[in-house]
């Protein structure tokens, strides 16, 4: 079972957008395990509904950008390129790159099937190229449809 690390507990419990009421680490860990179990049992169609209902639009965008940045780093793109491509600040790209270099995302990268990685990297390649190439823009639009 996936368990939150002490670092993630500190981060989560100290976020400013969460109510200031204290939650014990044990209670949080139990709730976290229940959430992970619920997510693990979702079917593909339900997963999208779950995410859309649970997360705000800005949280969804933030997760997609983080996910994209991690895969771009794995595909040897620089923090500057990541920053320019997915419209995050250079400091955010550099922070994520530093975490990537320290192996922070190894579990994430390890649990994504190679086919899914390749599909996402192909999508990112088209997305990057679409900024300057009409044919790549057409491929990207075709994927979206």
Image (cartoon, rainbow, N blue to C red):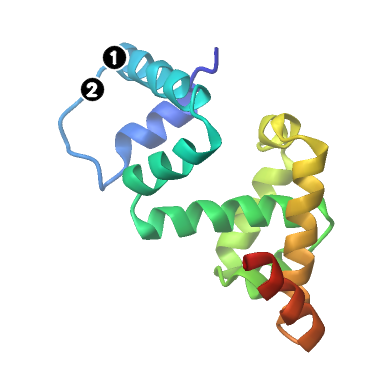
Mark 2 residue element: loop
Task: Work out whether residue 57 or residue 77 is closer to the camera in this orientation and state it.
Answer: 57
Identified at 33% across, 42% down, the residue is 54
Q: Are marks 1 and 2 in contact (CB under 8 Å)?
A: yes
Q: State the image coordinates of residue 111 (x, y, percent, origin top left).
A: 70, 29
- Residue under circle 1? 27
Determine the image quadrant of residue 141.
bottom right
22 to the left or right of 82: left
63 to the left or right of 115: left
Task: Work out whether residue 127 or residue 41 is closer to the camera in this orientation and state it.
Answer: 41
93 to the left or right of 17: right
- Residue under circle 2? 23
Q: State the image coordinates of residue 84 (x, y, percent, origin top left).
A: 65, 75
15 to the left or right of 79: left
Identified at 51% across, 51% down, the residue is 63
Disc 1 to disc 2, C-alpha distance:
7 Å
Identified at 63% across, 67% down, the residue is 144
Residue 133 visible in rendering: no
For disc 1, the neighbor class at 10 Å (few under 14, some 14 to 19, many from 20) is few
For disc 2, the neighbor class at 10 Å (few under 14, some 14 to 19, many from 20) is few
Task: Work out whether residue 28 or residue 138 is closer to the camera in this orientation and state it.
Answer: 138
Determine the image quadrant of residue 51.
top left
Residue 85 visible in rendering: yes
Compared with 31, 15 (above or below) is below
């Amino acid at each position: 079972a996936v368990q939150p690390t002490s670092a993630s507990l500190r981060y989560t419990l100290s976020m400013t957008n969460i109510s200031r009421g204290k939650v014990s680490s044990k209670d949080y860990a139990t709730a976290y395990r229940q959430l992970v179990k619920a997510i693990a049992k979702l079917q593909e169609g339900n997963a999208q509904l779950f995410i859309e209902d649970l997360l705000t639009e800005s949280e969804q965008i933030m997760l997609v950008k983080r996910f994209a940045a991690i895969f771009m780093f794995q595909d040897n793109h620089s923090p500057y390129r990541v920053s320019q491509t997915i419209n995050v600040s250079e400091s955010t790209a550099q922070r994520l790159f530093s975490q990537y270099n320290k192996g922070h995302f190894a579990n994430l990268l390890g649990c994504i099937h190679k086919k899914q990685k390749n599909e996402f990297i192909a999508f990112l390649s088209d997305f990057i190229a679409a900024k300057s190439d009409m044919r790549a823009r057409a491929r990207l639009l075709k994927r979206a449809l």
